[in-house]
Image (spheres, rainbow, N blue to C red):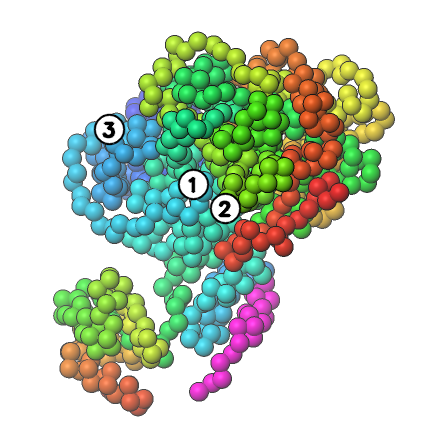
Amino acid sequence: MNATRSLAQELQEIDSVISKYKGKHGELLGILEESQLLNEHKFLSEEALNHVALKTGVPLSRVYNVVTFYSFFNLKPQGKHTITVCRGTACHTKGSRTLLGDLGLILNCKKELDEGEPFFTTPDNQFTVTTVACFGQCALAPVIAIDGIIYSNVTTSKLQMLVRRISKVRRIHEHH
Amino acid sequence: MNTTTMVNIKINGNDHQAPLNATILEACKRGGINIPTLCFMEDVSKNASCAVCVVEVKGAKSLLRSCTACVYDGMEIVTNSPRIRDARKTSVELLLANHPKDCLSCLRNQNCELQSLASDLGVKEERYVRTKKMEKCDTSSIAIHRDPNKCILCGRCISVCQNVQTVSAIGLSGRGIKSRISTYMEKGLGNVACTYCGQCALVCPTGAIVERDDTDSVFEEMSNPEKYVIVQTAPAVRVGIGEAMGMEPGSLVTGQMVAGLRKLGFKKVFDTQFTADLTILEEGYELIDRIRNNGKLPMITSCSPGWIKFAEHFFPDLLGHLSSCKSPQQMFGAVAKTYYAAKMEIDPRKIVVVSVMPCTAKKYEARRPEMRGAFDFWKDKRAWSSEDAFYDVDYVLTTRELARMFRETGIKFSSLPVEDFDHPLGASTGAAVIFGATGGVMEAALRTAYEVITGNPLADINFTAVRGMEGIKEAEVEMNGLKVKVAAAHTLKNARTLMEQIEKGESPYAFIEVMTCPGGCLGGGGQPIPTTWEIRKKRAESIYAEDANKPLRKSHENPAVQTLYTEFLKEPLGEMSHHLLHTRYRERGVFTWKTNENDPSMEKNNSFAAH
């Protein structure tokens, strides 16, 4: 485990990101993107956003506008593993809504899903579940991605198995 | 000579000419053809978000939004066809799907653009179901309330906040169905760097952004026999309230307003203009003091509470430039609960001061923790505890709220008699009237400063250089060989320009007037809706007409103010003034949710107040 960096350290690193982008076109997007990656939990904390606004002179409401518009930005800490459920039309007809519900049950986060929030992170920060509009793998529907690796023809039992495997912190390589 | 290139176009089969690069909407307006709009607002926004102003253009693949599409030579436009009517109606019906159907209990009932558009376009049924979740209202601010459910995402509030005021307290967040108007991290207007200027409420087409309504509390106070409820009215209200009661824009109704306020049940009807004259004396002497004693210059006026909050948020290092004078509203409260209370032998704890203002920020100003000058004055004399504490001004109503109270009590405005203000806090000069227009405080101050410094009467008291709707106005006045350069700015964008000049050390001015709202207080966030440039100009005409009609037009000639000094205050900038009429500011910065409003360490004393 990495030692947790202090907030001051993180803000200092953001400062160097800001100076790198200074005067460049689309400066704010670049700064926010790199700042998020700097964070241990891959998210932009309020302190980080405050800092970016203060140092760049961009109004706070504008910063908020940008980070809430792009789904890439996270305002909450992200889990160690990201599970992305495809919610495109093909996956939907093949039952991806059920898979999302299953994840809620498997990861004990049913409450968040019932509240209509399709993004959640488990309290132990192990998993973040998100959705995507389409992976472009419609022939293999329903598909999910775990940490960037796409799994096809996913069923409830397959999902359970995948999650259990990761929970045991074992790297999974599976090819279809 | 008009040098713009004109192009020939056809509108509904008729030949028209329009300037090249004019929008279709502008071209049609020129040709006398009306196109319904919703999100569009002249000089404020053209976001093309509502799709109500669509027209057909020959050769175009789809209907075009006339607010943004520009004309070209030979363009053939149709503004009325079954297809257009259907599209416009559908756009409004889609907006109505997510709009609550609580018109009857909405503050904007009968003054709502969405409501009238639905009626105009012949919407007869609810064809679409609601798709959005109900959201919580933002009631965190003392001045302005937001109901996101009523919002149609036209974006006018954002445009006015970002472009006219350069405050950016609100912005768009999310996307798609989750798009909404938000404050930073959903903290609420009361917790971010919002100036409470209320321009967002003034431009909102629906009831999504409104003033906090205090009419019920005022009615309740008036029905309490223990309380002595008095009212003060700002200069700009007399040119706005008639309009809010259905009269012509700019109607000057001072006398009827006074009669109406008496009918409502106020014990005394006083005038904020009395303390506007008082402000001129205090501020005029402060300016002279700063010029003579190498004080911080330029000195900037402090009557406009939105501007004060703006300076505290965005220019905390320059607060020393602000005049330490309280605004006329606050001076009134302090004088009413000390001088007037003593003179009339009324327990100041029983006096309720109600202000009628063209302003939403005044609601906030009245609740600034330091605005308890009268209580501090009495507490030792009467051995009162903190439980007896009261504010100098108890309630602030906007022009719109007063109109609501008039209507609720069945007061018919046009048939009211003309009555005079009560004495002594109702006497005022023409210099005080013009406080309601941009440049007015400057002009009033110059009238007095000139005569005090030179000892000679002014040949012409009309300083026309600081009048009018230009964003920043300049003038140079020579007094006894001393050349003084002054400027008057309205809107916070223009104020920002002057502040950045000061920041760089390049400000050529000795004295600057800032009014937060476009056109000054007459275009304030609490004024009747709509407020357009045309209407602002009409209100300004009435203000200057009232000034010209006043027998006395210089603040220092106000006999009631002179009496106030002899009987009570003694002299401008004296000990008593220091305690009652002057104030201090706070270095707020923009991360306001982290700071405590009552924290004295944030206070910044100005040169005079620090004596």
Residue A15 among those drawn in magenta: yes
- Kind of residue sitting beneath label 3: Ser
Residue B599 % position (x, y): 58, 54
Provide the residue designation for mark 2. B194
Q: Distance between the residues labelled 2 and 3?
A: 34 Å
Quarter of the figure that contains the N terminus of chain A: bottom left
Q: Is residue A49 above or below residue B47?
A: below
Chain where mark 1 sits: B
Q: How far apart are marks 3 and 1 (CA)?
A: 28 Å
Query: Do marks 1 and 2 share a subunit?
Result: yes
Please state which of residues B130 and B27 is positioned toward the viewer in this rendering: B130
- Kind of residue sitting beneath label 2: Cys
Residue B428 % position (x, y): 61, 18
Q: In this view, does B190 lie above or below B93?
A: below
Q: Which residue is drawn at 29% across and 79% down?
A: A146
- Sequence-first disc among 1 and 2: 1
**Chain part drawn in magenta:** A1-22
Q: Residue at x 25, y 32 (%)?
A: B104
Element carrying mark 3? helix
Please state which of residues B281 and B262 is positioned toward the viewer in this rendering: B262
> Which circle marks residue B144 in the picture?
1
Which quadrant of the structure image shows residue A145? Answer: bottom left
Residue B350 among those drawn in magenta: no
Element carrying mark 1? strand
Asked if the residue under mark 2 is in contact with the one under mark 1, i.e. CB atoms within 8 Å, the reply is yes
